[in-house]
């Protein structure tokens, strides 16, 4: 706390996963591989949708936005976490820096949840109103809904970040987490945080519970429409277009519900940190894998992109009297 006394700025440090250097090194390597995997996976999905004209549809436009959000989301968390692991928890982070991480965490995470609800609505229109799909899901509406999800994320993140950053902190400033998560930071405040906890719950309801209810409503209509289909092939295709999205929804909303829609007294900090590893490191890695494996169009487009990149980088081979490209 010497830095706080000299500069007037509050500093935190993250609780290390282990005080054993060997274990810490293994955790660092594991997190680094997960982060690199999420970067490569989401960049591949984004470039594939960007370059493949057959994927220039509203459904894949939203997938492109989702991959972009996941890139920002994981990059907001992973570098600071990796640096803290390397320092064995000795690295200091100032309150403004912690607030900036919280702001982008809520902004990108909230936008991600809202975007998943928009993607469910897209599937609802495609399956329940196929003849009017191109009329309803215009590019203008797609752009407006995407900007709306980012705008809502901004409106949710700014007031909560300001509230938490104005809390008084004193004494023990070790965050029992690997990033500046809101409940973990609020536990360190030396004042009553019931208003802040109520604000966090209200924001979690707006970012998690309401979009999830809209997703359930969309898929309720989708299932009812699919069950009325007479063609077995039509049912199979309809379910296959939704399966990837459903898996991502279960992974994202399941973790967020366990942390942000439960009273903090109902789970331990250890449980919160373990669940957070899933949605900050595993989820950004699994999302592109789920879409590329479960969605045949994306899988084929990724193979085309990789084949094109390999062909462009393939060196020229010179033979006597002949040039082979």
Image (cartoon, rainbow, N blue to C red):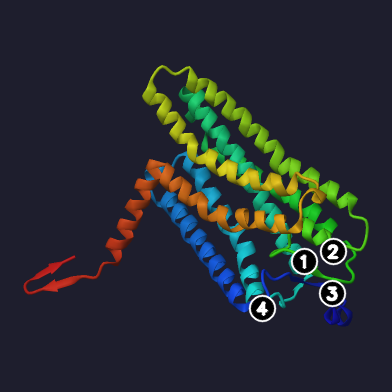
Marks 3 and 2, how far apart at CA: 15 Å
**Label placed on residue 175:** 1
Among numbered discs 3 and 2, the one appearing first in the sequence = 3
Q: Are marks 3 and 2 in contact (CB under 8 Å)?
A: no
What is the CA distance from the residue labelled 4 to the residue labelled 3?
Answer: 21 Å
Q: Mark 1 or mark 4, which is nearer the start of the sequence? A: 4
Q: Is residue 220 visible in this depiction of the protein?
A: yes
* Mark 1 residue crowding within 10 angstroms, few (<14) / some (14–19) / many (20+): many
246 left or right of 203?
left
Ranked by sequence position, the earlier of labels 4 and 2 is 4
Q: Earlier in the sequence, mark 4 or mark 3?
A: 3
Disc 4: CA contacts within 10 A as few (<14), some (14-19) or many (>=20): some
Tags 1 and 2 touching, CB below 8 Å? yes
Q: Secondary structure at mark 4?
A: loop
Q: Number of labelled discs?
A: 4
Q: CA distance from mark 4 to mark 1?
A: 15 Å
Residue 58 seen from this side = no
Looking at the picture, tell me which residue is in the foreground, 232 or 217: 232
User: Label 2's element?
Assistant: loop
The alpha-carbon separation of the residues under discs 3 and 1 comes to 16 Å
């Amino acid at each position: 706390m010497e830095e706080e006394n000299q500069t007037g700025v509050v500093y935190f440090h993250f609780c290390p996963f282990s005080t054993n250097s060997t274990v810490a090194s293994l955790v660092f390597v594991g997190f680094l591989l997960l982060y690199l995997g999420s970067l490569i996976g989401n960049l591949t999905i984004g470039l594939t949708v960007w370059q493949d004209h057959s994927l220039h549809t509203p459904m894949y436009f939203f997938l492109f936005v989702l991959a972009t959000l996941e890139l920002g989301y994981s990059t907001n968390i992973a570098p600071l976490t990796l640096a803290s692991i390397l320092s064995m928890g000795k690295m200091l982070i100032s309150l403004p820096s912690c607030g900036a991480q919280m702001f982008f965490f809520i902004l990108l995470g909230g936008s991600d949840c809202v975007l998943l609800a928009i993607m469910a609505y897209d599937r609802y229109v495609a399956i329940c109103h196929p003849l009017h799909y191109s009329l309803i899901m215009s590019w203008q509406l797609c752009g407006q809904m995407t900007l709306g999800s980012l705008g809502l994320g901004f409106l949710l993140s700014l007031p909560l970040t300001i509230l938490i950053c104005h809390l008084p902190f004193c004494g023990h400033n070790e965050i029992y987490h690997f990033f500046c998560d809101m409940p973990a930071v609020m536990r360190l405040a030396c004042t009553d945080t019931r208003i802040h906890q109520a604000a966090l719950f209200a924001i979690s309801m707006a970012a998690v519970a309401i979009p999830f209810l809209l997703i359930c409503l969309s898929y309720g209509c989708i299932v009812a429409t699919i069950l009325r289909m007479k063609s077995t092939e039509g049912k199979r295709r309809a379910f296959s277009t939704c399966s990837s999205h459903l898996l991502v929804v279960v992974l994202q909303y399941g973790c967020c519900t366990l942390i942000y829609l439960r009273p903090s007294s109902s789970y331990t900090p250890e449980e919160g940190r373990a669940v957070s590893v899933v949605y900050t490191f595993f989820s950004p890695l699994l999302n592109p894998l789920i879409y590329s494996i479960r969605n045949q169009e994306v899988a084929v487009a990724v193979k085309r992109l990789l084949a094109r990149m390999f062909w462009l980088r393939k060196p020229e081979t010179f033979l006597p009297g002949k040039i082979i490209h």
